[in-house]
Image (cartoon, grey):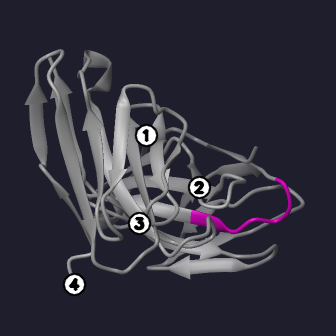
Amino acid sequence: GNSVTQMEGPVTLSEEAFLTINCTYTATGYPSLFWYVQYPGEGLQLLLKATKADDKGSNKGFEATYRKETTSFHLEKGSVQVSDSAVYFCALPAGGYQKVTFGIGTKLQVIP
Amino acid sequence: NAGVTQTPKFQVLKTGQSMTLQCAQDMNHNSMYWYRQDPGMGLRLIYYSASEGTTDKGEVPNGYNVSRLNKREFSLRLESAAPSQTSVYFCASSEGQGYNEQFFGPGTRLTVL
């Protein structure tokens, strides 16, 4: 079945630093890919998604490009803020009609 | 529009006790899900319901039962709680197919002593 691998972290960065969180996947076909974010004490919420190869998803200054040649969907942001401190999850459909497989989550801490 | 709501927010149980976690959504979504979140394990799917009247097992269903009461509500029951079920539980809903966004509730933090 489909699976996703992401770096566990934690990742600690200073404010305004560049962020990359790696995500690679194994899938049948070319499924949609997602990044979800979980702020402290809250549930997950969709950050961005890409529905086909070479698509770039973007939101709140974050970007990720769906690269089928490297089966990757790395999350990037050019200048992080303290408010970006959260756990980030890479995800893709699990191969079944309804289910989604989530990565283990990468905790990001941004210090002033 | 409250989205996905869960009750309770926190719960402490003793081993062997039972309880039901409640979840409701007001977005008219067909599909609903229960996940557990544990450190180093990410989110794992316990059960899901593709539509009203249907439920299916996910990755870690043992020790749990679910009920899709109607289109809005999807409950998770622990019949005899065990310390291994200490976790944070999230309910989610979506329009349907796996490529659609899932909307999550705020979670229930459960401790089993």
Dot 1 falls on which chain?
A: A
Q: Please tell me which residue is depicted at 42% across the width and 75% down the height of the picture.
A: B29
**Alpha carbon separation for disc pair 4 and 1:** 34 Å
Is there one chain holding both mark 3 and mark 4? yes
Q: Are marks 2 and 4 on the same chain?
A: no
Q: Of tags 1 and 2, which is closer to the observer?
A: 2
Residue B38 quadrant: top left
| Rendered position, B64 above or below B83 | below
- Indicate left or right for B9 with A59 as reference: left
Residue B83 x, y percent position in the rendering: 25, 17
Farthest residue to the right: give it.
Answer: A69
Q: Is residue B106 visible?
A: no
The magenta span reads A28-34
Q: Amino acid at mark 4?
A: Asn
Per the image, the residue denoted by label 2 is A99
The residue identified by callout 4 is B1
The mark nearer the N terminus, 3 or 4, is 4
Residue on which disc 1 sits? A10
Please identify the residue farthest to the bottom as the structure is shown: B1
Query: Mark 1 to mark 3: distance in Å?
Result: 28 Å
**Residue type at mark 1?**
Pro
